[in-house]
Image (cartoon, rainbow, N blue to C red):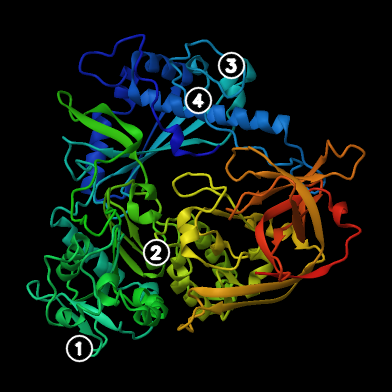
């Protein structure tokens, strides 16, 4: 049985067919079996004895739960809802497998293409009425009115470093059913249904349950104590230790709040610990390090002119005991191309060797500041209350809910391209988000504003210190592809920064693996990495046919065969198909790029590049399609060799990159086959490759998209040729 938090939502409390006794929030059975004086005393004793968990077990007949739901018991409603939604899920999977799923002798699915995963039906079952329906995936409340047995265990735990019981897991074992007992017993399997809640109580001793939903506010001084505790705990983590001695060219001396100033590495204490700031610039900052302000900033910075987020970052660094802070706007000469080229190769060292990166997640610009109160919590499972008997005369309130895990889309910083590598390279993050202050390092993640059993706020991490099986580079390759996919979805103010904004990450991976970097791709994995396609969607959800103006204004960004060349818009990798892909009479002969003048940093901006390959090429007409599905192909490739050229056969599809100009209707696209792809147990074979156009008159080609042709016979009579793609 699948365990999903989505089955914990008590959806049906609005309409009842009976009435609970005055002052009661639970049915008589729950008062007797669960929320009783005995249960309360057991909790109190466990708390006093500092026990980490306790269990409470009771049994119920499904029909009793059904009656209690009608009475309006919220606890029984959550139990009934979990069972019905699990049964819905099981029945839909059964229906999908019965309709589509078959396997061959290899045990592989015979489906092509893969069928979409069925979605849970979140409809309020009371609004459906009490009549049973026979179609799978639409069970109603009436299905609970049957004699199957429910063996229910409540596991109450202290999750994380909580001193009180803060999590409840309910394990429901269903048994005793036969097909004659209704649809419910026919679809429930032997696996238990599991649901989870967080729990608080405003009027029970805090040694038993927390009194409120936790959070750490940046508007109070509480965050200082918490952050110091997190930082001190992390100093004992082996994987978070600094491996090398490094000092940035310049730092901000924050020791005296009345005398903030710029210092050089020679002025600062030798190998002094420093913090870094990661934030969203937003509109152009008016007070930065320039050739004109350089001398004065060495004497004293004008704190009234420093952007609010940077000023808040200075406050955070000083309160946590740091004497120095690195901020790009005040530590890199902003009007000096030479200084930027000099500092860009050091970005990886700057963030990797920082003792702490202060992440200004909540601010959309440097002028906003971030030492502010968090937003109220949002819930995946909305809070509901039950009463528990503290003694024979007094009732206490328990509140059950499940808060939403951290949503990165609620904080502006997570949509900005430059800040991704700053976060991924740092070993410690103190995150000031809209939901509160959070911590993340390589061994620990803490988000007091979310459920205690939630995963880390950021899934993307770069493990450069791996040993054993990770040391061969395969893990790093997978990490890079994941980072590349995330990065392509992020917005960037200047498209010319597309390579610089991820250059520090590339430099670090190359340092570890000795791979050769070519404008966003790795030579050692080039065949696979060339199989990218553009989704032609911007982070704002716009669909791109032509390159937007800011891409055109940027001029040359990267070779057309590099995903970086699109400038904006998400890219899609087909890494899951990598093992089923083999070269289709295709060979990479050479790949070179040229870095921009005045730079020898091969991970930064480039001025040119060429990919030389040998492969089979077919020229095919096409037509535009108006499919709207995300990631769907937007052109069909046509075969006009038949008896009716006016009714051509569709033999493939393609996805165009954002274009410089709209193609004329009579244009033929050059299809360079790269790989043969075997899909599914039927071993359907298709050919994938690059869509090209020729650059006149030099005979080179440029990529304009990616294709998949279903019939490899198109290439049968064609000889391989050498192509220069720029």
Mark 1 / mark 3, whichever is N-terminal: 3
* Upstream in sequence: badge 4 or badge 1: 4
Q: Residues within 10 Å of mark 2 (few under 14, many from 20)?
A: many
Dot 1, how many residues are within 10 Å of its Cα: few (below 14), some (14-19), or many (20+)?
few
Please give the name of the residue rendered at 34% of the width and 81% of the height, measured from the top-left corner: 339
User: Image point 41% across, 62% down: which residue?
Assistant: 494
The answer, for residue 675, to whether it is visible in the render is: no
Helix, strand or loop for disc 2: helix
Front disc: 2 or 3: 2
Residue identified by numbered label 1? 267
Residue 293 in the image, given as x and y percentages of width and height? 19, 77
Q: Nearer the viewer, mark 4 or mark 2?
A: 2
Q: Nearer the viewer, residue 83 or 663?
A: 663
The span from disc 1 to disc 3 (Cα, nearest Å) is 82 Å
Q: Which residue is mark 4?
A: 84
Q: Is 653 above or below relative to 461?
A: above
Q: Is residue 249 left or right of residue 589?
A: left
- Marks 4 and 2, how far apart at CA: 46 Å
């Amino acid at each position: 049985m699948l365990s999903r938090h989505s089955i914990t939502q008590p959806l049906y409390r609005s309409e009842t067919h009976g009435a609970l006794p005055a002052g009661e929030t639970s049915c008589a059975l729950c008062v007797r079996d669960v929320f009783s004086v005995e249960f309360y005393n057991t909790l109190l004793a466990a708390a006093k004895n500092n026990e980490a968990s306790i269990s409470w077990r009771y049994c119920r007949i499904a029909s009793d739960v059904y009656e209690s739901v009608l009475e309006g018991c919220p606890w029984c409603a959550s139990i009934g809802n979990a069972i019905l939604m699990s049964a819905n899920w099981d029945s839909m999977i059964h229906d999908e497998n019965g309709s589509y799923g078959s396997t061959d002798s290899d045990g592989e699915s015979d489906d092509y293409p893969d069928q979409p995963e069925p979605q849970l039906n979140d409809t309020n079952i009371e609004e459906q009425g009490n009549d049973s329906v026979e179609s799978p995936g639409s069970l109603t409340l009436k299905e609970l009115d049957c004699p199957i047995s429910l063996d229910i265990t409540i596991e109450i735990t202290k999750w994380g470093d909580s001193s009180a019981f803060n999590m409840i897991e309910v394990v429901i074992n269903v048994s005793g059913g036969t097909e004659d007992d209704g649809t419910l017993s026919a679809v429930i399997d032997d696996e238990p249904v599991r649901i989870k809640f967080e729990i608080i109580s405003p009027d029970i001793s805090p040694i038993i349950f927390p009194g409120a939903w936790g959070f750490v506010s940046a508007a109070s001084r509480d965050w200082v104590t918490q952050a110091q505790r997190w930082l001190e705990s992390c100093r004992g983590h082996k994987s978070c230790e600094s491996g090398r001695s490094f000092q940035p060219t310049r730092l901000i001396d924050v020791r005296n709040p009345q005398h903030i100033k710029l210092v050089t590495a020679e002025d600062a204490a030798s190998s002094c610990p420093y913090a870094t700031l990661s934030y969203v610039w937003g509109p152009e900052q008016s007070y930065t390090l320039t050739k004109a302000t350089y001398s004065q900033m060495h004497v004293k910075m004008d704190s009234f002119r420093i952007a609010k987020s940077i000023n808040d970052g200075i406050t955070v660094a000083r309160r946590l005991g740091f004497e120095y802070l690195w901020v790009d706007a005040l530590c890199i000469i902003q009007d000096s191309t030479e200084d930027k080229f000099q500092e860009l190769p050091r970005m990886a060292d700057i963030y990797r060797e920082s003792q702490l990166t202060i992440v200004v997640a909540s601010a959309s610009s440097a002028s906003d500041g971030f030492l502010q109160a968090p937003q109220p919590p949002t819930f995946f499972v909305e809070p509901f209350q039950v009463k528990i008997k503290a003694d024979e005369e007094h009732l206490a309130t328990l509140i059950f809910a499940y808060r939403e895990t951290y949503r990165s889309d609620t904080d502006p910083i997570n949509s900005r391209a430059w800040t991704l590598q700053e976060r991924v390279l740092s070993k410690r993050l103190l995150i000031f988000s809209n939901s509160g202050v959070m911590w993340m390092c390589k061994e620990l993640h803490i988000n007091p504003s979310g459920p205690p059993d939630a995963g880390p706020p950021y899934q993307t991490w770069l493990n450069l210190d791996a040993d054993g099986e990770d040391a061969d580079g395969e893990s790093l390759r997978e990490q890079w592809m994941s980072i590349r996919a995330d990065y392509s979805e992020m917005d960037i103010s200047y498209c010319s920064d597309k390579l610089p904004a991820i250059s520090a990450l590339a430099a670090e991976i190359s340092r570890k693996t000795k791979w050769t970097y070519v404008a966003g791709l790795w030579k050692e994995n080039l065949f696979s990495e060339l199989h990218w396609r553009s989704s032609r969607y911007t982070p704002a959800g716009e669909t791109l046919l032509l390159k937007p103006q800011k891409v055109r204004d940027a001029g040359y960004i990267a070779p057309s065969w590099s995903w970086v060349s699109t400038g904006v818009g998400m890219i899609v990798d087909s890494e899951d198909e990598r093992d089923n892909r083999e070269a289709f009479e295709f060979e990479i002969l050479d790949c070179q790029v040229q870095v921009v003048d005045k730079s020898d940093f091969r991970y930064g901006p480039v001025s040119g590049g060429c990919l030389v390959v040998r492969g089979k090429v077919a020229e095919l007409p096409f037509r535009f399609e108006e499919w709207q599905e995300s990631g769907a192909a937007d052109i069909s490739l046509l075969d006009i060799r038949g008896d009716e050229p006016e009714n051509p056969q569709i033999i493939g599809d393609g996805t165009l990159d954002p274009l410089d100009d709209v193609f004329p209707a009579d244009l033929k696209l050059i299809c360079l086959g790269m790989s043969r792809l075997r899909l599914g147990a039927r071993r359907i074979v298709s050919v994938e490759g690059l869509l090209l156009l020729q650059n006149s008159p030099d005979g080179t080609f440029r990529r304009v998209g990616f294709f998949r042709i279903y019939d490899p016979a198109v290439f049968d009579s064609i000889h391989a040729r050498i192509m220069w793609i720029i």
